[in-house]
Image (cartoon, rainbow, N blue to C red):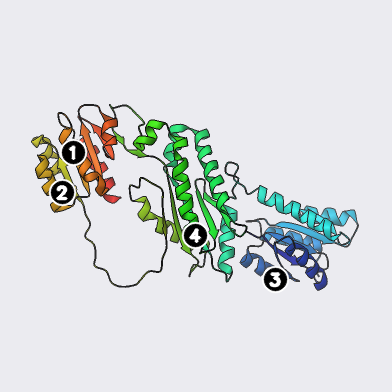
Amino acid sequence: MYKIKTLIISNRKELSIKYKKLIENLSQNALYTNDLSSALSIIQKQNIEFIIISDTIKENLSDFIQKIRILTFNFRPIIIAVSKSNDLEDRLLALEAGADEVLGEEISKSEFQMRFRAHLRRYFESSINPITKILEKNITQKAITSTLLEDLPYAYLLIKIEGIEHYQKTYGEIAYEKVLQTLSAIVNSTLSNDDFIGHVKDEEFILITNPINAEKIASFLTFAFDNILNKFYSTDEFENQFVIKSSDYTKENKSALMRLYISACEKQNQKTYQEVLSSLYSLILPIEKQDNLKSAYIIDRIRLKGETQEIKKNNIVLFFEKDRALSCLLKNVCELNEIEAILAFSKDEFIEQYQKNSPKIVMLDWGQDGVEALSLAKEIKKDNIKMIFSSSFLNKKEILKSGADFYIPKPYDIDDIISWIKKYLKG
């Protein structure tokens, strides 16, 4: 989908039109001008990547090339000089001034196109991610900026692999690269000739497509990713839907399997690449804050404007801990940290307080046999609430399978518990 922009600078209009047609026949964009001031204006506004300079201009060719090269040092376009001179010295001066190639005016149309295509191939190959074979951020930025200048409708999809950083640390670089390569293959299988895919980060991509296809693509990608996920984990990990990193003797935050999150928005009033990214990252936040068991996507819809009542922040934690001294200590430390703590010492009392106060976090203690705690965990698991489990019995796997987000063995540091509570309250 992405077409590079070429600026032709020549005083002979027929020469400019000739090169413009040859470039457009290669499905690329081209425009022309005949002086330095207008050329610089076009280069800065249009994201010009290729510049063809003819020696028909009023200035000396090598001097002109040098000026262009100095003024475009921050993004370095490909410069092709075209000269009617056969003098070797003239060509060498143009190359020394910064031209990437010097062509003679007598060059045939087919050779001109072949040489242009060779530069085009090298340009894109130098911007391809070596792992995914997808274009890097610099081209993505230009592609988005280009669509914002057009009158056509576009949709932008941010594709993000949640949890891949943890996967990389646990399984290593080769497994990490295999995930990216597999996702790349899936994404490329959905693209039409008019679509574009490029990186914004190593594990994040932007897909540009027609608004009509946006939801269909997002739905397929999340479905396909979930259906190949079992290839990257052991059978036990995939069935449990989490990974255990360390032994029962150490605390552990539950590490879920990887998920594919996608946000999509249409081209509306955005004026810059940064505004498009800001819209997509803001849109994906609600998905990231949920504990999704499957990949998910969100599509920006037309939103109705109106006043809404301010929602009161929920900072309630419900503790099920039968050790009354420890319970009181937890409650006091929570209150010192401006966290509302509610205590329950039996299953019935817990259920009553849970229904009455709708806490954001619950902390359950395994107790002697774990029966009551597991029963409570099973009841509240469906509510997608944050669960912290403490235990003296070193049964991390069973606890995490029950739906717990964080496991901590007893005895534990109260400050450690408070720091995790604060983290979950912010989420």
Q: Amino acid at mark 4?
A: Ala
Q: Earlier in the sequence, mark 3 or mark 1?
A: 3
Q: Nearer the viewer, mark 4 or mark 2?
A: 4
User: Label for residue 375?
Assistant: 1
Residue that mark 4 sits on: 214
Q: From what the image shows, is residue 49 above or below residue 201? A: below
Q: Nearer the viewer, mark 3 or mark 1?
A: 1
Residue that mark 2 sits on: 354
Q: From what the image shows, is residue 237 above or below residue 217? A: above
Give the quadrant of the N terminus.
bottom right
- In this rendering, position of residue 353 left or right of residue 395: left
Q: Image quadrant of residue 386? A: top left
CA separation in Å, label 4 and label 1: 42 Å
Q: Earlier in the sequence, mark 1 or mark 2?
A: 2
User: Label for residue 169?
Assistant: none
Please tell me how crowded label 2 is: few (under 14), some (14-19), or many (20+) other residues with Cα within 10 Å: some
CA separation in Å, label 4 and label 2: 40 Å
The residue depicted at 60 percent of the width and 55 percent of the height is 139
Nearest the camera: 253 or 395? Answer: 395
The residue depicted at 9 percent of the width and 35 percent of the height is 325
In the structure shown, which secondary structural element does the residue marked by tag 4 occupy? helix
Residue that mark 3 sits on: 37
Nearest the camera: 230 or 63? Answer: 230
Q: Amino acid at mark 2?
A: Tyr
